[in-house]
């Protein structure tokens, strides 16, 4: 499992852990499956509502794709001060190495919007030493 230090934007902390999923991967057809667990914590003094996500997925071959959409895994959680939301999702790459980063569009009770940064994290198949 690979993890990165949390990143805090306007009182919203984002932490990510990623790991390789060998049972769903197949190197013969260049299918490498990774899962990642995200913890979003509201360290601010006001409630925040996660509205949208925007991911940049970079593959080891130099290709980058963007994924945008409402909420995360079908949810648009509202987090009161001190609350957090955790979820697990995944990505399929055409090679054993890549990375992801992005932003969450967050809305406060007063209607103001900001983008909480998702720290860049690696997607990497573990290597075996002989």
Image (tube, grey):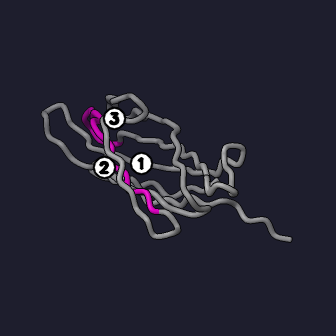
Labels 2, 3: front one:
3
Viewer can see residue 8? no
Q: Which residue is mark 2?
A: 116
Q: Residue at x 27, y 32 (%)?
A: 47
Count residues near mark 3 (Cα–Cα under 10 Å), then give few for <14, some for 14-19, many for 20+: some
Q: Secondary structure at mark 3?
A: loop
Residue 39 percent across, percent down from the top left: 47, 42
Q: Which residue is mark 1?
A: 14
Labels 3, 1: front one:
3
Q: Earlier in the sequence, mark 2 or mark 3?
A: 3
Mark 2 in CB contact with mark 1 (< 8 angstroms): yes
Numbered range of the magenta stretch:
43-58
5 over 15 or under it: above or below: below
Drawn side of residue 113 relative to residue 90, left or right: left
Residue 20 percent across, percent down from the top left: 64, 51
Q: Secondary structure at mark 1?
A: strand
Q: Which residue is mark 3?
A: 71
Drawn side of residue 77 relative to residue 61, left or right: left
The residues tagged by marks 2 and 1 sit, at their Cα atoms, a distance apart of 8 Å
């Amino acid at each position: 499992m690979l993890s990165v230090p949390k990143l805090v934007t306007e009182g919203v902390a984002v932490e990510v852990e990623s790991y390789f999923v060998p049972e769903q991967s197949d190197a013969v057809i260049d299918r490498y499956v990774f899962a990642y667990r995200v913890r979003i914590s509201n360290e601010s003094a006001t409630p925040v509502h996660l509205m949208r996500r925007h991911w940049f997925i970079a593959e080891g071959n130099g290709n980058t794709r963007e994924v945008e959409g409402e909420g995360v895994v079908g949810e648009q959680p509202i987090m009161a001060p001190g609350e957090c939301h955790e979820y697990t999702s995944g990505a399929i790459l055409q090679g054993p190495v890549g990375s992801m980063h992005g932003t969450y569009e967050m809305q406060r009770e007063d209607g103001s919007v900001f983008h909480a940064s998702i720290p860049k994290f690696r997607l990497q198949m573990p290597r075996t030493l002989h």
